[in-house]
Amino acid sequence: MGEKRKEVHAIATSAMLSCLCAISATLASYFVWGSLLALFLIPFFSSLAAYKMPNKFLPIYALASCSFCLLFSFHELSSALFTSFPGVLGGTLYGYLRKKECPIGYPILLGSYIYFAFTLLSVPLIEALIGRNMMEDGLWILGLNENQTARELTLLILYLFSLSSMLLASFFSEGIRVRIIEKSEKREAFLWGYPIFIALFSLLDFAFCYVLPSLCYVFLCSAFFLLICSYILYAKMMKLFHYLIDGFFFFIGIIIFALLYPLCPNDYIGGCLLGIPFLLFAIFKMFFLWRYQHQKT
């Protein structure tokens, strides 16, 4: 009976948070500052709901919250599609992964990519439905509509907003505490995840440098974020000389980048070569983990 009561309480709390998402979506539909608040309030409310709610009800919560947001901001459809839906889905994934005791970097990164993907998908949909270009509107709000560099890097700007929204949601839902690291540190998959993902993003950066340079900078940003998170996870495992070796490999990567940069046809493709230092860092980190686990056995 106690478990049933806890479940009902969690569902009631999540229903209240779903209503708060709808209120945030309403503010976003009327005011520019409301849109900025909704960028992190909706992921924040959704992450709390996902953390408290039983997993079997998460799809229902996500569907209900998206429906409420759409209902309360139907007069401004672009706001619901561009801000509310990605925020609900990204925040729900974040809360679910934290409940599974994932180190904080994974939920933030994956939540930001869900946010980014659905925001990106909403742009052509909004333009088809109401003839409004949300990318142009966003650049105008930021005062960058005349800046050619900003236009070239619109995907990076959009991803930075997605990542910032998840970082703020994480900060407000947990403060600066990373209370699950001690448990997560013992899981082998989590230890290897950061260098593997950093290497993957570095390779994707190289693969897309001639096709879509703007997307390459998104991958570089993700690799940099994971590099910072890796030091949080490995803090108890590393000694001073490990940090020095990290710096050495990263410095070698910077030198290789500087030598290859003049050979690139333009600055945007040249910037994509910044994946080299991250790739070398990831290779050394995988060697370090292999040595660490070998010494333990």
Image (spheres, grey):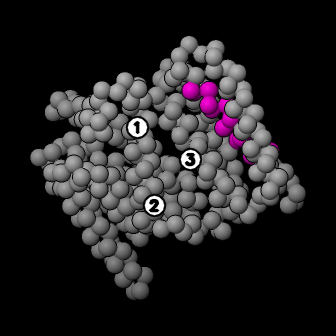
Q: CA distance from mark 2 to mark 3?
A: 14 Å
Residue 275 image position (x, y, % from top left): 63, 32
**Mark 2 and mark 1: Cα distance apart in space:** 20 Å
Q: Quadrant of residue 257?
A: top right
State whether residue 88 appears in this view.
no
Q: Mark 3: few, some, or many residues within 10 Å (few <14, many ≥20)?
A: some
- The outermost residue toward the bottom is 1
Q: Residue at x 65, y 52 (%)?
A: 230
Dot 3 amino acid type: Phe
Rendered view: 145 above or below 83: above
**281 falls in the magenta region:** yes
Question: Viewer-proximal residue, 119 or 68?
Answer: 119
Circle 2 residue: 170
- Which residue is under mark 3? 225
Write down the region rendered in magenta: 271-287
Which mark sits nearer the N-terminus, 3 or 1? 1
Mostly what secondary structure, the magenta segment?
helix
Tell me which residue sits at (35%, 36%) in the image: 120
Disc 2 residue type (three-letter)? Ser
Question: In the figure, is residue 192 to the left or right of 13?
Answer: right
